[in-house]
Amino acid sequence: MRILHTMLRVGDLDRSIKFYTDVMGMTLLRKRDNEKGRYTLAFLGYGPESSTAVLELTYNWGVDSYELGTAYGHIAIGVDDIYGTCEAITAAGGEVTRAPGPVKGGTTVIAFVKDPDGYKVELIQGRT
């Protein structure tokens, strides 16, 4: 068994695809409309779906925002150079909400980024 994907509902699919490709460096792997269900799916990732977990963005036609709720935590992405990654994210227009540094009470270096819909993305140094 393996994790296939994580799904997020988004209010503006093009804006979210742009964020995850231009700011976070993912590739748009596939996209499809479902006329009957009135939604569009976009799958993005750092590698092919056959071998890596990917992110599924779901746009329900006509819905432009969602309550994030208190149960959601974050998406975690491993990076080789967290400081350089945060600089690149900021330069590309992304918002780093927690600067790189050790996790409280530990040594693992993390940072947080906020996507256009307000979802948290955690960056973890050395977990690639």
Image (cartoon, rainbow, N blue to C red):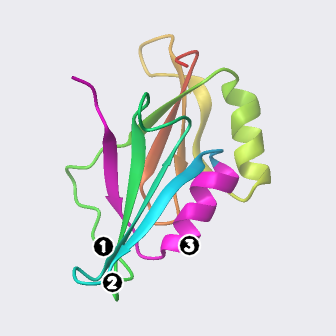
| Marks 1/3: CA–CA distance | 16 Å
Q: Residue furthest bottom?
A: 62
Q: How many marks?
A: 3
Estimate how packed mark 3 is, as few (under 14), some (14 to 19) or many (20 or more) residues with alpha carbons within 10 Å: few
Residue drawn at (80%, 51%), measured in percent from left and top? 91
Q: Which mark is residue 63?
A: 2
Q: CA distance from mark 2 to mark 3?
A: 14 Å
Residue 90 circle label: none
34 versus 22 height, above or below: below
Q: Residue at x 44, y 49 (%)?
A: 120
How far is the residue under mark 1 from the one under mark 2?
8 Å
Horizontal relation, residue 118 to residue 102: left or right: left
Q: Indicate which label's residue lies in the foreground, 2 or 3.
A: 3
Q: Which residue is mark 1?
A: 66
Residue at x-position 38% and y-position 54%: 56
Q: Residues within 10 Å of mark 1 (few under 14, many from 20)?
A: few
Say which of marks 1 and 2 sits in front.
Answer: 2
Magenta segment: 1-23
Q: Give the residue number, with chain letter if any, for mark 3.
A: 14
Contact check, label 1 and label 2, Cβ < 8 Å: yes
Q: Mark 3 or mark 1, which is nearer the start of the sequence?
A: 3
Looking at the image, which is closer to me, 94 or 56? 56
Q: Residues within 10 Å of mark 2 (few under 14, many from 20)?
A: few
Q: Amino acid at mark 1?
A: Tyr
Q: Quadrant of residue 8?
A: bottom left
* Residue for point 26% across, 49% down: 72
| Residue 41 within the magenta-colored segment of the rendering | no
